[in-house]
Amino acid sequence: MSESPLIEHTRSAFSDKFGTAPALVVQAPGRVNLIGEHTDYNDGLVLPCAIDYRTVIAARERDDRVMRIVAADYANATDEFSLDAPIERRDDPMWANYVRAVIDVLVKRGLPMRGLDMVISGDVPQGAGLSSSASLSVAVCRVFATLPGFESLSPIDMALIAQQAENDFVGTKCGNMDQIISASGVEGHALLIDCRSLETQLVPIPSGAAIMIFHSHVERGLVDSEYNTRRRQCEEAARHFGVKALRDVDAAMLEARGGELDPLTLRRARHVVTENARVEAAGQALAAGDLARMGELMEASHVSMRDDFEITVPLIDQLVDIVKGVVKQSGGVRMTGGGFGGCVVALVPEEQVADVSAAVEQTYRGPEGQLATIYVCRAAAGAGVVAA
């Protein structure tokens, strides 16, 4: 990977802080989920791609057991602790807990940990549903994976360590999609992930298709509590059907016995069951370069999130409608992420990018009159070493 301003900035910040050059620099990307929402924790299917916005960490080994971590994006705020003492959660700052969380998991796994100096910087938009937290967690794990004694850590291993860190230490009961795509992404491709078996299938992004992300600037204030509520409702539905997860319920089973559920739980289950089917179909559509079919599936996904899972909000729905009004049948658009704000993702022909951007800039205004922030992305590579 060629040097980017972000990598140069992180390297320079390390030299300024520690008076020496870093021994290594790693990166881990954020992600956008093209289709497959709230299916990951139901052991289902998802179709994300890594994006060319990332967390970068510059690091150098120390000769003691001290971890010293500097956040270049937060005025060089520093967190310092010893590997020889219990690693505790901090009330503030939150970024420090994601770093501590990964290190805590690695320590408890008995890996040959050693002290490090690290400087962290990133350009993954925060609070937008593009997985800045997973990007950070995977990047921390990737730093250690370069060291002697960590050779056995595969990308999937790193993803699961990062997920465990968020689940157990940070307290976010996330699924494994964000971490897997950040660790395992392949340039130019989406990744169809089976969140139960952890099998992945490369799906090429069609030539001439642009990935557009629109940040609505609707704060995702309800996402944590409502996420946990939706998860509980899905688990309740799975118990009713006597299965491990809603992944094991198909359309026929839902049709035959769905009426036994209360109407709200039925809608939640129906979203997950139909969304898994849409992901499978979307993988086939993308592989065939069929953006029109992909657009139909993305539209149906958004309707399901709006009506059955009830995780969209009016401004997100409006943003989707604006983009759809330009793209029509030549591409697709839907909300992406946990819901209740955040971002909209679109797959559009490159020649329509300017028209879509103009329509959004002219018509959409956020809660305080803001323009949407528009990112035109490419499907990027997963976590790796960018300099030694």
Image: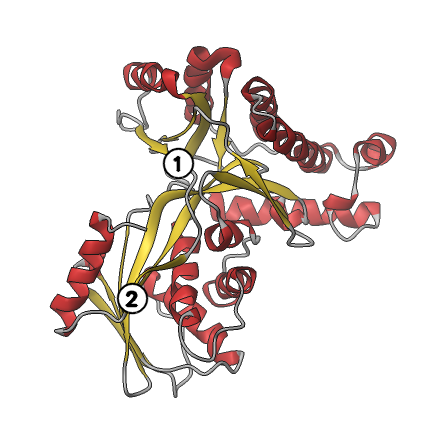
Residue 141: percent from left, percent from top: 43, 66
Q: Quadrant of residue 302?
A: top right
Could you tell me which secondary element the residue under label 1 belongs to?
A: loop
| Residue drawn at (57%, 52%) of the image | 175
What kind of residue is marked 2?
Ala
Instruction: Say which quadrant the C terminus sits in.
Output: bottom left
Q: CA distance from mark 1 to mark 2?
A: 25 Å
What kind of residue is marked 1?
Arg
Could you tell me if residue 67 is visible in this image? yes
Tag 1 residue: 378
Residue 180: percent from left, percent from top: 53, 53
- Compared to residue 383, the image places residue 39 above or below, namely above
Sequence-first disc among 1 and 2: 1
- Left or right of residue 53: residue 207: right
- Compared to residue 301, the image places residue 23 above or below, namely below
- Compared to residue 56, the image places residue 115 above or below, namely below
Tag 2 residue: 388
The residue nearer to you, when weighing 44 against 219, is 44
| Residue drawn at (41%, 43%) of the image | 380
